[in-house]
Image (cartoon, helix red, strand yellow):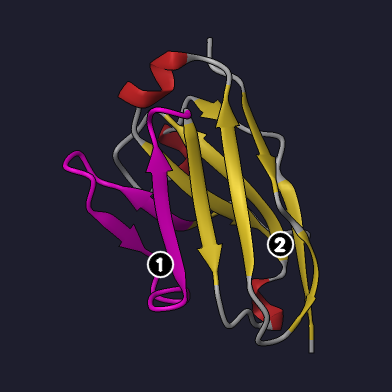
Amino acid sequence: QVTLVETGGGLVQAGDSLRLSCAATSETFSSLSVAWFRQAPGKSHKFVARLTVDGTPVYADSVQGRFTISRDNAKNTLDLQMNDLKPEDTAAYYCAAGAYVSDPAAYVYWGQGTQVTVSS
């Protein structure tokens, strides 16, 4: 069993930056595929970023060039650096582990989410 805990969310202005972090409780995290999703009120989970089998980052078109996903297997953490934030980035952000795809339904482990709110 892997427990994921996200931190780093908050209220920022458009153009600001935030860094989200996801900490895992199990060392097996380092062997799992990882991703970030987000969910706006009344909407389903949307893919944000993930790492492929060989560690190559994949991004949603809407965040390409602004967001950076990275992991530190020694610390069992997954980060999401978000730059040039826009109001449309407002959502609860979730880290997930267990699948090498962009479909949230395929992921086994989920964090509780951290809220990011971007004001215009």
According to the picture, the residue beneath numbered tag 1 turns out to be: 60
Secondary structure under tag 1 reads: loop
Residue 10 lies, with reference to residue 55, above or below; the image says below
Relative to 22, 70 lies left or right: left
Residue 10 sits in which quadrant?
bottom right
Q: What residue type is disc 1 on?
A: Ala
Question: Mark 2 and mark 1: span between their CA atoms?
Answer: 15 Å
Amino acid type assigned to the residue bearing label 2 in the image: Ala
Numbered circle sitting on residue 104 = none
Residue in view at x 74 percent, y 56 percent: 9
Q: Based on the picture, tell me whether residue 49 belongs to the magenta stretch.
A: yes
Q: Quadrant of residue 116?
A: bottom right
- Depth check: 13 or 48 in front? 13
Compare residues 107 and 59 and report the one nearer the observer: 59
Q: Which residues are magenta?
A: 48-75
Residue 36, given in percent of the width and then of the height, sits at: 50, 49
Residue 91: numbered disc: 2
